[in-house]
Amino acid sequence: MPELPEVETVRRGLQPVMEGAKIVKAEARRADLRFPFQPDFVARLQGQVVTGLGRRAKYLMADLASGDVLLMHLGMSGSFRVIKPNDEKSPGEFHYPRGKDSSHDHVLFRMSSGADIVFNDPRRFGYMKVIARNALEDEPLLRGLGPEPLGNEFDAAMLAQSCAGKKTSLKAALLDQRVVAGLGNIYVCEALHRSHLSPRRIAATLATRKEEPTDHAKRLVGAIHAVLNDAIKAGGSSLRDHRQTTGELGYFQHSFKVYDREGEPCKTPGCGGIVKRFTQNGRSTFWCPKCQK
Ligand SMILES: [Zn+2]
Protein backbone atom coordinates (compact mmCIF):
# COMPACT_ATOMS: atom_id res chain seq x y z
CA MET A 1 0.00 0.00 0.00
CA PRO A 2 1.42 3.40 -0.91
CA GLU A 3 2.52 5.38 2.11
CA LEU A 4 3.11 9.09 2.56
CA PRO A 5 6.38 9.37 0.56
CA GLU A 6 4.83 7.55 -2.42
CA VAL A 7 1.76 9.80 -2.33
CA GLU A 8 3.97 12.86 -2.07
CA THR A 9 5.97 11.64 -5.07
CA VAL A 10 2.75 11.14 -7.04
CA ARG A 11 1.73 14.68 -6.08
CA ARG A 12 5.00 16.10 -7.33
CA GLY A 13 4.63 14.15 -10.57
CA LEU A 14 1.07 15.34 -11.20
CA GLN A 15 1.61 18.94 -10.13
CA PRO A 16 3.19 20.19 -13.39
CA VAL A 17 0.35 18.83 -15.55
CA MET A 18 -2.53 19.67 -13.20
CA GLU A 19 -1.79 22.98 -11.52
CA GLY A 20 -3.07 25.91 -13.53
CA ALA A 21 -4.67 23.62 -16.10
CA LYS A 22 -8.36 23.14 -16.75
CA ILE A 23 -10.06 19.76 -16.60
CA VAL A 24 -11.43 19.80 -20.13
CA LYS A 25 -13.03 16.40 -19.75
CA ALA A 26 -13.58 14.08 -16.78
CA GLU A 27 -14.65 10.48 -17.09
CA ALA A 28 -15.61 7.90 -14.45
CA ARG A 29 -15.74 4.61 -16.29
CA ARG A 30 -17.58 2.69 -13.59
CA ALA A 31 -20.13 3.50 -10.92
CA ASP A 32 -17.77 2.95 -8.02
CA LEU A 33 -14.28 2.35 -6.75
CA ARG A 34 -14.13 1.63 -3.03
CA PHE A 35 -17.22 3.84 -2.72
CA PRO A 36 -19.75 4.86 -5.39
CA PHE A 37 -18.85 8.02 -7.30
CA GLN A 38 -21.10 10.95 -6.40
CA PRO A 39 -23.86 11.49 -8.97
CA ASP A 40 -22.46 14.96 -9.76
CA PHE A 41 -18.78 13.84 -9.68
CA VAL A 42 -18.07 14.53 -13.36
CA ALA A 43 -20.19 17.68 -13.53
CA ARG A 44 -18.32 19.29 -10.63
CA LEU A 45 -14.93 18.59 -12.25
CA GLN A 46 -15.47 19.30 -15.90
CA GLY A 47 -14.49 22.80 -16.97
CA GLN A 48 -12.76 23.56 -13.66
CA VAL A 49 -9.27 24.99 -13.38
CA VAL A 50 -7.06 23.21 -10.83
CA THR A 51 -5.63 26.04 -8.77
CA GLY A 52 -3.40 23.88 -6.58
CA LEU A 53 -2.51 20.26 -5.83
CA GLY A 54 -1.83 19.54 -2.17
CA ARG A 55 -1.62 16.54 0.13
CA ARG A 56 -3.00 15.69 3.56
CA ALA A 57 -1.72 12.39 5.01
CA LYS A 58 -2.25 9.95 2.12
CA TYR A 59 -4.87 12.07 0.36
CA LEU A 60 -4.16 14.13 -2.73
CA MET A 61 -6.26 17.29 -2.76
CA ALA A 62 -6.84 19.23 -5.96
CA ASP A 63 -8.24 22.71 -5.36
CA LEU A 64 -10.70 23.77 -8.02
CA ALA A 65 -11.59 27.30 -9.08
CA SER A 66 -15.21 26.60 -8.10
CA GLY A 67 -14.29 26.29 -4.42
CA ASP A 68 -14.56 22.51 -4.50
CA VAL A 69 -11.71 20.17 -3.62
CA LEU A 70 -11.14 16.85 -5.38
CA LEU A 71 -9.99 14.34 -2.77
CA MET A 72 -8.09 11.32 -4.16
CA HIS A 73 -6.81 8.25 -2.33
CA LEU A 74 -4.70 5.53 -3.97
CA GLY A 75 -6.02 2.72 -1.76
CA MET A 76 -4.02 -0.52 -2.08
CA SER A 77 -3.19 -0.59 -5.76
CA GLY A 78 -4.17 2.75 -7.29
CA SER A 79 -1.77 4.62 -9.55
CA PHE A 80 -1.80 7.51 -11.97
CA ARG A 81 -0.40 7.62 -15.43
CA VAL A 82 0.28 10.83 -17.28
CA ILE A 83 -0.02 10.53 -21.03
CA LYS A 84 1.17 13.34 -23.22
CA PRO A 85 1.59 13.07 -26.97
CA ASN A 86 4.68 10.84 -27.46
CA ASP A 87 5.31 10.55 -23.74
CA GLU A 88 3.96 8.53 -20.86
CA LYS A 89 5.00 8.28 -17.25
CA SER A 90 3.74 7.15 -13.88
CA PRO A 91 4.61 9.46 -11.04
CA GLY A 92 5.37 7.61 -7.82
CA GLU A 93 6.05 4.25 -9.34
CA PHE A 94 8.98 3.08 -7.33
CA HIS A 95 8.18 0.62 -4.62
CA TYR A 96 4.67 0.11 -5.98
CA PRO A 97 4.60 -0.62 -9.69
CA ARG A 98 1.46 0.61 -11.36
CA GLY A 99 -1.18 -1.59 -12.93
CA LYS A 100 -0.49 -2.22 -16.59
CA ASP A 101 -3.91 -3.55 -17.60
CA SER A 102 -5.97 -0.81 -19.21
CA SER A 103 -9.20 -2.58 -18.20
CA HIS A 104 -8.41 -1.15 -14.74
CA ASP A 105 -8.23 2.43 -16.04
CA HIS A 106 -11.23 3.75 -14.13
CA VAL A 107 -10.94 7.53 -14.19
CA LEU A 108 -9.64 9.92 -16.82
CA PHE A 109 -8.93 13.65 -16.64
CA ARG A 110 -8.15 15.37 -19.92
CA MET A 111 -6.26 18.54 -19.04
CA SER A 112 -5.95 21.75 -21.02
CA SER A 113 -2.17 21.28 -20.59
CA GLY A 114 -2.45 18.58 -23.25
CA ALA A 115 -2.01 15.71 -20.79
CA ASP A 116 -4.39 12.85 -20.09
CA ILE A 117 -4.26 11.72 -16.45
CA VAL A 118 -5.47 8.16 -16.02
CA PHE A 119 -6.24 6.49 -12.70
CA ASN A 120 -5.69 2.73 -12.76
CA ASP A 121 -6.73 0.58 -9.80
CA PRO A 122 -6.98 -3.23 -10.15
CA ARG A 123 -8.20 -3.84 -6.58
CA ARG A 124 -10.42 -0.75 -6.44
CA PHE A 125 -9.67 0.24 -2.85
CA GLY A 126 -8.90 3.76 -4.07
CA TYR A 127 -11.48 6.52 -4.02
CA MET A 128 -12.26 10.02 -5.21
CA LYS A 129 -14.70 12.51 -3.84
CA VAL A 130 -15.52 16.16 -4.56
CA ILE A 131 -16.05 18.22 -1.42
CA ALA A 132 -16.73 21.92 -0.93
CA ARG A 133 -13.59 23.47 0.59
CA ASN A 134 -15.59 25.04 3.41
CA ALA A 135 -16.96 21.59 4.35
CA LEU A 136 -13.56 19.89 4.61
CA GLU A 137 -13.50 20.16 8.39
CA ASP A 138 -16.65 18.09 8.63
CA GLU A 139 -15.48 15.49 6.11
CA PRO A 140 -15.51 12.06 7.82
CA LEU A 141 -12.56 10.84 5.74
CA LEU A 142 -10.34 13.62 7.10
CA ARG A 143 -11.74 14.18 10.55
CA GLY A 144 -9.60 12.75 13.32
CA LEU A 145 -6.42 12.69 11.25
CA GLY A 146 -3.44 13.52 13.43
CA PRO A 147 -0.62 15.92 12.57
CA GLU A 148 1.40 15.69 9.36
CA PRO A 149 4.71 13.98 10.26
CA LEU A 150 6.64 16.53 8.22
CA GLY A 151 4.56 19.50 9.36
CA ASN A 152 5.67 22.08 11.90
CA GLU A 153 3.28 21.02 14.65
CA PHE A 154 4.57 17.44 14.84
CA ASP A 155 7.46 17.37 17.28
CA ALA A 156 8.69 15.35 20.26
CA ALA A 157 6.46 17.26 22.69
CA MET A 158 3.35 16.51 20.67
CA LEU A 159 4.27 12.85 20.18
CA ALA A 160 4.96 12.46 23.90
CA GLN A 161 1.60 13.96 24.77
CA SER A 162 -0.28 11.61 22.44
CA CYS A 163 1.61 8.59 23.78
CA ALA A 164 1.52 9.47 27.49
CA GLY A 165 -0.20 6.69 29.42
CA LYS A 166 -0.67 4.53 26.31
CA LYS A 167 -0.11 0.85 27.07
CA THR A 168 -0.01 -0.13 23.40
CA SER A 169 3.26 -0.87 21.62
CA LEU A 170 5.23 1.87 19.92
CA LYS A 171 4.53 0.16 16.60
CA ALA A 172 0.76 0.30 17.12
CA ALA A 173 0.90 3.90 18.36
CA LEU A 174 2.73 5.08 15.25
CA LEU A 175 0.30 3.27 12.96
CA ASP A 176 -2.60 5.06 14.69
CA GLN A 177 -3.54 7.84 12.24
CA ARG A 178 -4.78 10.01 15.13
CA VAL A 179 -1.27 10.08 16.63
CA VAL A 180 0.48 10.91 13.35
CA ALA A 181 -1.09 10.82 9.89
CA GLY A 182 0.18 8.97 6.85
CA LEU A 183 2.64 6.46 8.33
CA GLY A 184 2.21 2.80 7.40
CA ASN A 185 3.95 -0.47 8.16
CA ILE A 186 7.09 0.11 6.09
CA TYR A 187 8.12 3.52 7.37
CA VAL A 188 7.15 2.73 10.97
CA CYS A 189 9.52 -0.29 10.88
CA GLU A 190 12.23 1.86 9.31
CA ALA A 191 11.82 4.77 11.74
CA LEU A 192 11.91 2.47 14.77
CA HIS A 193 15.08 0.84 13.46
CA ARG A 194 16.74 4.17 12.74
CA SER A 195 15.94 5.40 16.25
CA HIS A 196 17.08 2.06 17.79
CA LEU A 197 13.75 1.62 19.58
CA SER A 198 12.02 -1.74 19.88
CA PRO A 199 8.65 -2.05 18.13
CA ARG A 200 7.45 -3.83 21.31
CA ARG A 201 8.37 -0.94 23.60
CA ILE A 202 5.37 0.54 25.44
CA ALA A 203 4.28 3.83 23.85
CA ALA A 204 4.00 5.52 27.26
CA THR A 205 7.81 5.41 27.58
CA LEU A 206 8.01 8.34 25.15
CA ALA A 207 6.71 10.62 27.91
CA THR A 208 7.83 11.48 31.40
CA ARG A 209 5.30 11.62 34.25
CA LYS A 210 4.78 15.28 33.43
CA GLU A 211 4.08 14.26 29.82
CA GLU A 212 7.34 15.85 28.70
CA PRO A 213 9.14 14.12 25.82
CA THR A 214 11.87 11.64 26.75
CA ASP A 215 15.07 11.32 24.71
CA HIS A 216 13.41 8.35 23.00
CA ALA A 217 10.64 10.61 21.72
CA LYS A 218 13.14 13.13 20.39
CA ARG A 219 15.15 10.39 18.67
CA LEU A 220 12.03 8.87 17.18
CA VAL A 221 10.73 12.13 15.73
CA GLY A 222 14.14 12.78 14.17
CA ALA A 223 14.11 9.29 12.67
CA ILE A 224 10.58 9.70 11.26
CA HIS A 225 11.60 12.94 9.58
CA ALA A 226 14.80 11.43 8.17
CA VAL A 227 13.16 8.24 6.87
CA LEU A 228 10.32 10.11 5.14
CA ASN A 229 12.58 12.78 3.67
CA ASP A 230 14.99 10.17 2.33
CA ALA A 231 12.13 8.27 0.68
CA ILE A 232 10.66 11.43 -0.84
CA LYS A 233 14.10 12.34 -2.12
CA ALA A 234 14.49 8.89 -3.66
CA GLY A 235 11.05 9.20 -5.27
CA GLY A 236 11.94 12.60 -6.57
CA SER A 237 15.14 11.30 -8.10
CA SER A 238 13.20 8.49 -9.76
CA LEU A 239 11.00 11.19 -11.35
CA ARG A 240 14.06 13.12 -12.48
CA ASP A 241 15.75 10.02 -13.85
CA HIS A 242 12.71 9.36 -15.95
CA ARG A 243 12.87 12.73 -17.57
CA GLN A 244 16.45 12.05 -18.58
CA THR A 245 15.67 8.71 -20.15
CA THR A 246 13.00 7.31 -22.37
CA GLY A 247 10.16 4.93 -21.71
CA GLU A 248 8.54 4.02 -18.47
CA LEU A 249 9.56 5.19 -15.06
CA GLY A 250 11.91 2.60 -13.57
CA TYR A 251 10.99 0.31 -10.73
CA PHE A 252 12.67 1.99 -7.84
CA GLN A 253 13.73 -0.26 -4.96
CA HIS A 254 14.02 1.58 -1.70
CA SER A 255 17.14 0.97 0.29
CA PHE A 256 15.22 -0.31 3.30
CA LYS A 257 17.28 -1.00 6.39
CA VAL A 258 14.98 -3.61 7.97
CA TYR A 259 11.73 -3.84 6.03
CA ASP A 260 11.47 -7.11 4.09
CA ARG A 261 15.01 -8.11 5.14
CA GLU A 262 14.31 -11.04 7.50
CA GLY A 263 17.45 -13.12 8.13
CA GLU A 264 19.79 -10.52 6.65
CA PRO A 265 22.47 -8.63 8.58
CA CYS A 266 21.45 -5.42 10.33
CA LYS A 267 22.67 -2.32 8.54
CA THR A 268 23.41 -0.35 11.70
CA PRO A 269 27.19 0.20 11.63
CA GLY A 270 28.94 -2.12 14.08
CA CYS A 271 25.73 -3.88 15.20
CA GLY A 272 26.26 -7.36 13.74
CA GLY A 273 22.66 -8.38 14.52
CA ILE A 274 20.28 -10.24 12.21
CA VAL A 275 16.94 -8.76 11.10
CA LYS A 276 13.96 -10.65 12.54
CA ARG A 277 10.29 -10.68 11.63
CA PHE A 278 7.25 -11.26 13.80
CA THR A 279 3.54 -10.60 13.52
CA GLN A 280 2.29 -7.62 15.48
CA ASN A 281 -1.35 -6.45 15.32
CA GLY A 282 -1.79 -8.72 12.32
CA ARG A 283 1.10 -7.26 10.32
CA SER A 284 4.75 -8.14 9.80
CA THR A 285 7.21 -6.23 11.93
CA PHE A 286 10.85 -6.28 10.86
CA TRP A 287 13.44 -5.29 13.43
CA CYS A 288 16.90 -5.93 14.85
CA PRO A 289 16.68 -7.29 18.42
CA LYS A 290 20.32 -6.41 18.98
CA CYS A 291 20.27 -2.64 18.41
CA GLN A 292 16.59 -1.82 18.98
CA LYS A 293 15.76 -1.61 22.68
ZN1 LIG B 1 21.07 -3.95 14.62
Image: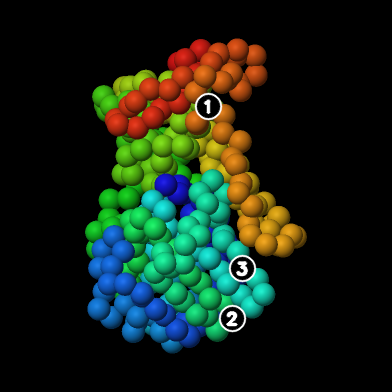
The quadrant of the picture occupied by the C terminus is top left
According to the picture, the residue beneath numbered tag 1 turns out to be 261
* Left or right: where 120 falls relative to 145: right
Residue 211's x, y, as percent?
33, 28
Q: Which residue is at the front of the view, 270 or 148?
A: 270
Element type where label 1 sits in the image: loop
Element type where label 3 sits in the image: strand
- Amino acid type at circle 1 is Arg
Element type where label 2 sits in the image: loop
Residue 208 position (above or below residue 248): above
Labels 2 and 1: the sequence-earlier one: 2
According to the picture, the residue beneath numbered tag 3 turns out to be 88
- Amino acid type at circle 3 is Glu
Quarter of the view holding residue 257: top right
Residue 224's x, y, as percent?
50, 37
Residue 106's x, y, as percent?
39, 69
Q: CA distance from mark 2 to mark 3?
A: 14 Å
